Image (tube, rainbow, N blue to C red):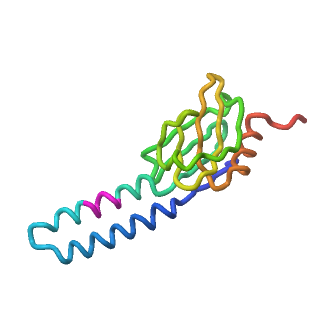
Amino acid sequence: MAYQHTQIGTIIFVLVAIIIGIMIVVWLNSDNGYWIIPAATIIFLVVLLTLFGTLTVEINGNTLQCRFGIGLIRKSFSLSDITAVTTVRNPWYYGWGIRLTPKGWMFNVSGLDAVELTFTSGKQFRIGTDQPRRLAAAIQEKIDPPSE
């Protein structure tokens, strides 16, 4: 495997842990009929963390793959379709998760740094990462291998 990195959404984990803590306190102090709301909220947040708490990026063979959490939400690209790769910094308002930005779709779990891919179709896709230079170099090496 040419590249593999999993970025953890630390801020997401901390915020969800705080909310779960609050929900546990509410649950323990609720009357008999109102425990379902905090319990459902805790279950929802655990599922949310499982699906979106991390972002893994892999380059394997001729494929670049990005997947959130356990991998139910993923996107794969053929490296032969990529014409350019650039390190970029996203504005804060692009946010985290799966976003449609003015530059195309974006997967991001934390931070503002990203790698922008440009495809033969002209479309673009951004991958948020805490290793932008390393990821860009790994992709560049695959799409433009050194001559022998």
| Residue 65 is covered by the magenta coloring | no
> Which residue shows up at 49% across the image and 36% down it?
100
Q: Residue furthest right?
A: 148
Residue 17 at what x, y percent from top left? 39, 69
> Which residue shows up at 71% across the image and 44% down it?
136
The quadrant where residue 61 appears: top right
Q: Is residue 133 left or right of residue 125?
A: right
Q: Nearer the viewer, residue 48 or 70?
A: 48
> Up-down: is 87 above or below 130?
above
> Up-down: is 129 above or below 26?
above
The quadrant where residue 115 appears: top right
Q: Is residue 86 left or right of residue 107?
A: right
Tell how many labels.
0
Magenta region, residue range: 41-46
Q: Is residue 97 left or right of residue 146?
A: left
Q: Nearer the viewer, residue 79 or 124?
A: 124
> Which residue shows up at 67% across the image and 31% down it?
82
Residue 58 at what x, y percent from top left? 61, 47
The quadrant where residue 36 appears: bottom left
Residue 38 at what x, y percent from top left? 23, 65
Image quarter in which the C terminus is found: top right
